[in-house]
Image (cartoon, helix red, strand yellow):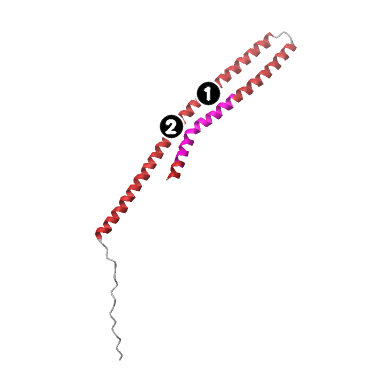
Amino acid sequence: MSKTADKPTEAAEFATVDPGKATDQLRAVAEKGVEQSKEALAKFQSGAEDARKALESTAETAKSVGSELSLKMIAALRANAEADFSHVEALVRAKSLPEVFELQTTFLRKRVEMGVEQAKEFQELTSKAAADVSKPVTDAFEKVLKDLKAA
C-alpha cells in the first residue's frame, strides 16, 4: 500500500465586497441613468414642441397662401369675363365681316397675352407659396439636425 502524501489544500481567496461601497456604486449608476433619462425626455419634449409650432405655422401659412391664390384666381376670372363681354359687345356693333375678323384676331392676340401674363403671375405666386409653406418645417428639421450634431 502506498501512501499518498497529503498536500495541504490551498483556499481560494475571493475579493471581499464591501456592501456599503456596492450600494453606493449602484446608487450612482441609477442616479446617472435617471439623469440621462430626464435629459432625453427634455430633449424629446422640446423637439415635440418645436414640431407642433412648425406645423401650426405651416397651417397658418397654407391658409393665408390659399386665400391669396383664391383671390388671384377670382381676379383673373373676373378680368377674363370682362374681356369676353367687351369682345361680344364689340362683335355685335361690328358693321362688316372684315371688321369682325379684325376684332376676333385682336381679341385672340390679347387673350393669349393675358393668359401668358396670368400664368406667370400664378407660377410666381405658387412658387412663393411653396417656399413659404415649407419654410417652418425646413427650419425645424435643420434645428433638429443641428441639435443632433451637437449632441
Work out which residue is located at the far left of the displayed protein and give it: 20
Figure quadrant of residue 94: top right
What is the number of the mark on residue 51? none
Secondary structure at numbered mark 2 = helix
Residue 72 is situated, as x and y percent measured from the top left of the image, at 55, 22
Q: From the viewer's perspective, is 118 left or right of 109?
A: left
**In the foreground, 96 or 59:** 59
**In the foreground, 58 or 144:** 144
Residue depth check, mark 2 versus mark 1: number of the one nearer the observer: 2
Taking 68 as reference, is 85 above or below it? above
Q: Which residue is mark 1?
A: 70
- Per the rendered image, the range of residues in magenta is 121-145
Quarter of the C terminus within the rendering: top left
Amino acid residing under circle 1: Ser
Q: Earlier in the sequence, mark 2 or mark 1?
A: 2
The residue positioned 57% from the left and 27% from the top of the image is 124
**In the foreground, 53 or 39:** 39
Q: Which secondary structure dominates the residues rendered in magenta? A: helix
Count neighbours of disc 1 (C-alpha within 10 A) and say few if under 14, some if 14 to 19, many if 20 or more: few
Amino acid residing under circle 2: Glu
Work out which residue is located at the far front of the displayed protein and give it: 150
The residue positioned 25% from the left and 61% from the top of the image is 18
Q: Which residue is mark 2?
A: 56
